[in-house]
């Protein structure tokens, strides 16, 4: 999947030291492509009425719905604060002030060590975090498809030299640009995996190997919708008509690149939030500020978080996501 | 390896604190911890001179499991099977006690219960117990709030008997392929992200890679059913955790000590089901255990947990618990273990029980009533307190020998063959009279 540069071995399991990494033409091309993604995203979102806010970096709580990862504690004048694993709680609250917002937000997650070799996990990474008041999941899926097409058009147009240097054929994006992204339910994805003799729990998220398996069989990104409750955190909204089913989604890239984004409609009513917190093993007292806001009314919303480095990896056709960041930090590996 | 230093550390510390267990036969437990299997027999010095016989209980007991008798039959068809298999008469040494406990292989149906954060469990005893449980290859549960109270132990942020110290002490001595470590978490402990911490820690990699790590969701406990954890802390220690826990001046405004309470956490069937689902989702490489208090709906709760995918359900009888609890709860609240076992009945799922277990007959009675394994709590602490180097090992060896003798007497050589017909409860009709099959049929 990765093309080679004549002078630089591209396939590498682990990052080299900072000098070699920064001097690598692969890194440089990837970061220029990443810059194009940021420029094009801002362009698209501004044109669609979104306001960019600056993301909070620490808070008393952060995103609770992160599979197996550990949060980083910060001593805030004697109070235990967290580095953001995602800004979801702040995204919802910010809709009190504005109708449509986005952040380009840094996240830090101490991922389990087993993720170091997946090629798609970084401890420190960035998300394009988008949220729209009153939006439905379907509207936000349209928005995400539109955004991705705009970004790809921009990158293909503006970064053609870098794509060529990386051996990435712009033609691979033709299906993405011209055909709607497929939508399959979690249940359908499980059935598809089981038919491929992959053991996938119907109650859990699609595991990484499974995601790769489905993604290898497609030519454009696709959505998996309707995850079961018990596979995600409390902010993912539960269907009012189909209890146990979440009004959420993942966006999966084709050709084995895997998950790019997660999102959906949010839980926003106080009572439902409290119940969902307990169902996800959370202590509501920890979320005091957020619940206080919810008690007086949080707007209904939908949105998503799109991984900037993962999208870069996909567009640039890189082997590993660490190639799409200047200072890669992999699970369990101390690095600058 | 660090582990070679730990027993010595533990021994030094363990002798400092004397602990008392007034509701257990403490001197008998200490004798076993000190003298090993010699202590399960009458004094050998008296052999040939003394006439022995059953000793009436010193005081009447209300504990149904204590009252029950193990009742070997005269006819033993399973011994005939074993005789054919071996080509000689079977003995107690031929009893197979190996089993699986909540997804872990174990040499006998015994595990080490959590000690929690009480001071009794600190002072190096937890560490000594971990090292010995490892040596025995029996699964070990590490208490819910060891991390919030004792620290994790990484980067020198806590004493040696923090969570990491206990995991390392266990892992360094455990035989390959046997046992496992179970890390508990309850509602408030979620703040400390204990599971996430362990799951992403290099120290736990070996356990994860060998499938020997489990997480236990603590729904309740035996000593105080319906309440959360309680410990007594000095005022400065309480101040340090006051953001997470309720702190009361239960002992008066002038007292130097205060009461620290956790919430019991709110559970419904849906909450328990989804919490188990999320644990399985978030920690796919860990086993999932659920610990219940002896509630009146314990069967329903156990079934919810099993159906949601829990590898084991642990039930602590009302007579259990190492911790500190209001007297009104110790004496009046919760189902006794025998009634829990009766309500849950035999299931095709792992049911682990604890509550005043220290010797073989109580263990066997629980197994015959449907438990898959029994947990040692207070008795293990007393044993380690008696001898920090080998006390628990000796106590377990005693229990092991008694189990072998009892099973052999019943003419059974596999744990799964035990059933209610092996017990007689005074005042209750025997299983035969209730229309059960005869053993020899």
Image: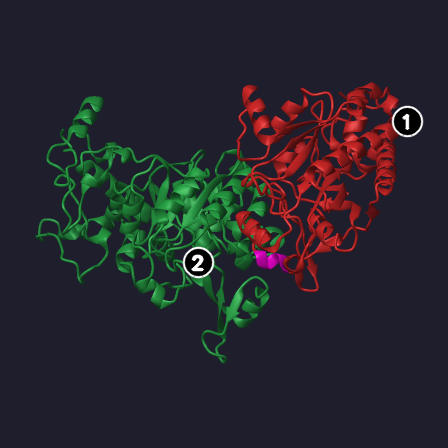
Chain that appears green:
B
Which residue lies under the disc numbered 1?
A157
Magenta region: A284-288
In front: A92, or B373? A92
Question: Label 1 crowding class (10 Å Cα cut-off): few <14, some 14-19, many 20+?
Answer: few
Q: Colour of chain A?
A: red
In front: B396, or B106? B106
In front: B108, or A145? A145
Where residue B23 appears, as percent x and y from the top left, is 29, 61
In 3D space, how far apart are the residues under numbered discs 2 and 1 (Cα atoms)?
66 Å
Question: Does residue B245 show up?
Answer: yes
Most extreme residue toward the front, as rendered?
A241
Please identify, in this view, whether the residue under mark 2 or under mark 1 is nearer the observer.
1
Where residue B429 appears, as percent x and y from the top left, is 14, 46
Q: Is residue B362 left or right of residue B9?
A: left
In the depicted structure, whether residue B420 falls above or below residue B233 = above
Question: Does residue A27 show up?
Answer: no
Residue found at x 15% / y 49%: B428
- Name the chief secondary structure element in magenta: helix
Question: Label 2 crowding class (10 Å Cα cut-off): few <14, some 14-19, many 20+?
Answer: many
- Mark seen at residue A261: none
- Label 2 resides on the chain identified as B
Which residue lies under the disc numbered 2?
B121
């Amino acid at each position: 999947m990765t093309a080679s540069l004549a002078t630089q071995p591209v396939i590498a399991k682990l990052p080299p030291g900072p000098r070699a990494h920064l001097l690598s033409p692969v890194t440089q091309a990837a970061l220029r492509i990443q810059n194009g993604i940021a420029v094009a995203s801002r362009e698209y979102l501004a044109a669609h009425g979104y306001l960019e806010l600056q993301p909070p970096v620490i808070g008393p709580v952060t995103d609770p719905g992160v599979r197996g990862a550990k949060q980083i504690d910060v001593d805030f004048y004697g109070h235990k604060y967290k580095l953001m694993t995602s800004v979801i709680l702040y995204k919802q609250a910010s809709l009190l002030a504005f109708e449509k917002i986005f952040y380009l937000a840094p996240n830090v997650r101490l991922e389990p060590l087993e993720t170091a070799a997946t090629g798609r996990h970084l401890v420190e990474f960035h998300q394009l975090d988008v949220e729209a008041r009153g939006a439905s999941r379907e509207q936000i899926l349209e928005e995400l498809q539109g955004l991705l097409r705009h970004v790809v058009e921009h990158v293909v147009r503006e970064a053609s030299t870098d794509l060529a240097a990386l051996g990435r054929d712009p033609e691979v994006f033709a299906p993405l640009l011209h055909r709607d992204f497929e939508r399959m339910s979690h249940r359908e994805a499980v059935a598809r995996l089981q038919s491929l003799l992959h053991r996938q729990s119907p109650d859990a998220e699609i595991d990484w190997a499974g995601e790769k398996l489905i993604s290898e069989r497609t030519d454009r990104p696709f959505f998996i919708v309707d995850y079961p409750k018990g596979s995600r955190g409390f902010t993912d909204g539960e269907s009012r008509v189909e209890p146990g089913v979440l009004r959420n989604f993942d966006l999966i890239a084709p050709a084995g690149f895997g998950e790019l984004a997660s999102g959906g409609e949010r839980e926003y009513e106080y009572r439902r939030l409290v119940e969902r917190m307990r169902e996800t093993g959370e202590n509501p007292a920890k979320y005091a500020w957020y619940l206080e806001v919810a008690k007086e009314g949080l707007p209904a919303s939908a949105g998503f978080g799109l991984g900037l480095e993962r999208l870069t990896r996909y567009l640039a056709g890189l082997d590993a996501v660490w190639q799409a960041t200047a200072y890669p930090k992999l699970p369990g590996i101390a690095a600058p | 390896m660090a582990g070679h230093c730990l027993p010595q550390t533990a021994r030094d510390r363990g002798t400092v604190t004397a602990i008392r267990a007034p509701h257990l036969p403490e001197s008998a437990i200490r004798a076993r911890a000190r003298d090993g299997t010699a202590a399960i027999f009458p004094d050998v010095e008296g052999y040939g001179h003394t006439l022995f016989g059953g000793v009436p209980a010193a005081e009447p007991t209300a504990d149904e499991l204590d009252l029950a008798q193990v009742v070997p039959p005269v006819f033993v068809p399973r011994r005939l099977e074993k005789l054919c298999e071996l080509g000689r008469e079977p003995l107690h040494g031929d009893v197979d006690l190996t089993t699986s406990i909540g997804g872990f292989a174990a040499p006998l149906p015994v595990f080490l219960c959590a000690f929690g954060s009480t001071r009794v469990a600190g002072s190096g005893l937890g560490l000594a117990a971990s090292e010995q449980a490892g040596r025995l290859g029996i699964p070990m549960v590490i208490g819910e709030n060891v991390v919030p109270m004792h620290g994790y132990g990484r980067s020198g942020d806590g004493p040696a008997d923090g969570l990491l110290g206990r995991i390392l002490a266990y892992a360094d001595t455990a035989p390959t392929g046997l046992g496992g470590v179970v890390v508990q978490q309850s509602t408030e402990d979620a703040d400390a992200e204990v599971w996430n911490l362990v799951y992403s820690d290099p120290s736990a990699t070996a356990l994860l890679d060998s499938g020997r790590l489990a997480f236990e969701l603590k729904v309740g406990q035996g000593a105080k059913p319906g309440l959360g954890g309680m410990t007594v802390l000095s005022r400065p220690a309480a101040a340090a955790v006051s953001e997470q826990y309720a702190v009361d001046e239960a002992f008066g405004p002038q007292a130097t000590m205060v009461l620290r309470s956790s919430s019991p956490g709110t559970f419904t069937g849906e909450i328990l089901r989804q919490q188990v689902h999320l644990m399985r989702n978030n920690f796919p490489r860990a086993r999932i255990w659920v610990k219940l208090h002896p509630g009146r709906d314990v069967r329903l709760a156990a079934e919810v947990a099993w159906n949601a995918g829990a590898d084991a359900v642990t039930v602590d009888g009302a007579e259990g618990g190492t911790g500190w609890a209001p007297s009104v709860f110790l004496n009046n609240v919760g189902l006794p273990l025998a009634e829990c076992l009766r309500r849950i009945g035999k299931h095709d799922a792992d049911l682990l029980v604890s509550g005043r277990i220290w010797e073989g007959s109580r263990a066997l009675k629980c197994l015959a009533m449907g438990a898959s394994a029994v947990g040692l709590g207070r008795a293990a602490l007393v044993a380690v307190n008696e001898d920090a180097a080998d006390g628990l090992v000796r106590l377990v060896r005693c229990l092991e020998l008694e189990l072998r003798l009892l099973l052999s007497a019943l003419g059974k050589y596999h744990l799964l063959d035990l059933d209610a017909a092996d017990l007689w409860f005074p005042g209750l009709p025997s299983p035969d009279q209730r229309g059960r099959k005869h053993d020899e049929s």
